[in-house]
Amino acid sequence: MPNVASMLRYALKRLISLLISLAVASVVIFAVIEVAPGDPASFMLGVNAQEDTLAALRAELGLDVSKAQRYFNWVGGMLMGDFGTSYTYRTPVSQMIADRLWVSLPLALYALTLSTLIAFPAGIYAAARRGKPGDLTVMGATQLGIAVPNFWFAMMLVLIFAINLRWFNAGGFAGWDQGLWIGLHSLTLPSIALALPQAAILARVMRSSLLDILGEDFMRTARAKGLSRRQALWRHGVRNALIPVLTIIGLQFSFLLAGSIIIEQVFYLPGLGRLVFQAISARDLIVVESVVMLLVFAVITVNFLVDLAYAAVDPRLRSRT
Amino acid sequence: MSLLQIENLSLSIHGAEILKQVSLSIDPGQIVAVTGESGSGKSMTALAVMQLLPNGAQAQGAIRLEGQDLLNRPEGEMCALRGAAVGMVFQEPMTALNPVKTIGDQVMETILIHNAMPRPQALARTQEVLTRVGLPPDRFPLSRYPHELSGGQRQRVVIAMAIALRPKLLIADEPTTALDVTTQAQILDLLKGLVREYSMGLLMITHDLAVVADMADQIVVMRRGEVVESGATTHLLRNMQHPYTRMLFEASGHQVSLPRAADPRPLLEVTEVTRDYRLPRKGLFGTPGHHRAVDGVSFALNKGERLGLVGESGCGKSTLTRAILGLEEVQSGDIRLDGQPVFAGHRPNLAVRRKMQVVFQDPYGSFNPRHRVARLITEPFHLLETPPAGSERQDRIAEMLTAVGLSPDDAGKYIHEFSGGQRQRIAIARALIIRPELILFDEAVSALDVSVRAQILDLLAELCATYDLTYLFISHDLRVVRTITDRVMVMQAGRIVEQGETEQVFANPQHPYTQTLIEAAPVLPDIGVNVA
């Protein structure tokens, strides 16, 4: 099958560009953070620390070797799963990140799933009824969804579903060892709060992309074949409208993974956002570096997946370079 | 009983009157051509038969297919008719197909959506019908996507979709307007053959009178939503009654007489020019291939000479034009204007640039809609070291607008206030305003209606007399090139295969490709022009 071969060739090309991006990103992150003024050792020990104590701490933290050496130590360690030791907590960074990732990753995926589930039907519905009351209602709702900040949604959700109805806890994370259902249950309110504004954006993108497609010549061809308006929309419209929507979904996932710090705060969730925030305040550079690198990895990987999705949707991209 | 009967069809869209009392009829096996200029309502008539009118359309009168009224059919029944009893082919094959579905799926969809037959038979019918339109599955597998086919091949797919269920009526809306002449001839032959084979009625919408004269059994001439004249082709062509019909035929075959070129000194010299484009790599580590768009082209254009360049899409016309304009550097060869190279070092030579101007095809896309005409036509002034200012600038604007048949008062207007023909006049004014040595007309009259085109050609002949123009006229329209140029070059696959005096090349083409081109181009019958 030539289609499979061209798809594989395309995937391989994207994979190579992914690896190059990661290498470049690691150098940039290391340079920016290491070049920034401020010595973690003196920060940890305070201004009155003795010079020999400082030197001992620097040696312990691995700060006494050359910059290049430190870069390779850092990258080499990450490749082996060793992200170093936190300056402040003196625990392995990999463990800290792993704990937080178990909250942030499911939260992001949960929110993204909800947002897609809301946005696709809403966008398609609005596009199919352009200018009619249904469209206006959806557009009005999405306007509201974009305008209102997500922490306000979060507080309203807590007020209604946790305090009044008592269906959910107001905050905290039960942990996955209690069972999948319990874990998901405690992530539901934050996911909804995160998903609503994203869904509003996504629905608008879906609608406008679909409206563009509805004006295309091939939609008229489809109608001339005998397809009803609805059949033409579903069979020929939706898949063509997906490209800009996939782009937005990719961007949203990257944002949700680390950008949910306010929501994490509102719901007392031990997520990545809070970890970065605390690490930056404490000048815990090794943690900041590692989390940022992880996020870059996530963003680049998501872009890679989005690229693959483009090619799956649109055969023209497979034959192009 | 006629297959299709349209009686007193009137149509308005949001209150604006589009069609007035249109009547026509088509018998099985008959080809009826509806012709007229843009805005005549010919496409709306076709869409009314399909009941695919834009929102806000209100139709009165009657459209009957085999005696059954179509105008008041519920949408569900129309869906059952479309594609099964009536098929339709559109103008733009490049966009008429869904880019993300294979051609097999798209043709088969016509069959499956009407539940005409179970899937295995539908697949067999798909293969059969694609073979019939000239795309046998052994060479064009059903798994091909539209972007893997040429324009002509895509139009064949659209035709296959339309005839898959052997409809009684086929509607073709400008089916060959976007295609090259040789492809056009093939598609027209295919349509004629299908009409005969299936005894379909064919309602053909086209602005090209030569195509009409060649194809149709009956002609319907429309203007501003009304039928002005209709009848059997030979009869109508012999006895044109309505002045509009006569005007159309006259304008289609419009001839201008160019003044003699004065001074035979070479102005533009193109020597052994070659331009390659890199193709995408085949494998990951394979070396990228090359496509030679322009291949060792040499010619000279004398001062005061009008040179034509003809050829089909993809032959390298546009690449050559871009190279002459200095928009792209060529790999080898030399392009000089007045002895100076268009590329100095690796940068476009500004001294040469200000001696050349270009007029493009699209009178709508080539202007900034937010600028007034005065600013639009003085754009080339930025090429000058000391652009005219103050009253001198005003005088130049007024002179140019007058020269192209507009009024100096038009300088304060925006481009949307002008029609397509007027816009092309403004484009010519913009090109002329710095008195360039050379003008390139890139398909400059191709998008215009025949009557407007005739006026623009007259304008060019006039300007040749006043300003002693030298131009390179690039077009796929052989009729236009024949009248508006002194000398012509024929380009095929990046090479100039023939060049010579225009009249001589057309009357006695030497290269087989030139012969094919001239043979494929539809010809206006003499009868009509003589009457007028």
Image: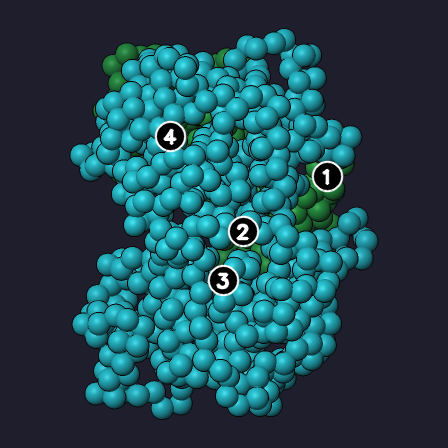
For image coordinates 63% across by 70% down, the residue present is B504
Q: Chain of mark 4?
A: B
From this view, report whether residue A95 is shown above or below residue B313.
above
Corner quadrant of residue A117: top left
Q: Position of residue A126 (x, y in %)?
A: 33, 27
Mark carried by residue B480: 3
Report whether residue B16 is seen: yes
For image coordinates 53% across by 42% down, the residue present is B214
Q: Position of residue B215 (x, y in %)?
A: 52, 38
Mark 1 neighbour class, 10 Å CA radius: few under 14, some 14 to 19, many 20 or more = some
Q: Which mark lies nearer to you, 2 or 4?
A: 2
Left or right, B228 with respect to A176, comes to left
Secondary element under disc 4, as helix, strand or loop, is: helix
Disc 2 marks which residue?
A: B523
Q: Chain of mark 3?
A: B
Q: Going from the N terminus, do you reach mark 4 or mark 3 first?
A: 4
Depth check, front residue: B426 or A58: B426
Disc 4 marks which residue?
A: B47
Depth check, front residue: A282 or B511: B511
Mark 3 neighbour class, 10 Å CA radius: few under 14, some 14 to 19, many 20 or more = many
Q: What separation in Å lies between label 2 and label 3 (alpha carbons)?
A: 12 Å
Q: Which mark lies nearer to you, 1 or 3?
A: 3
Disc 1 marks which residue?
A: A6
Colouring style: by chain
Of all chains in the rendering, the one displayed in green is: A
Q: Position of residue A107 (x, y in %)?
A: 48, 28
Q: Which mark lies nearer to you, 2 or 1?
A: 2
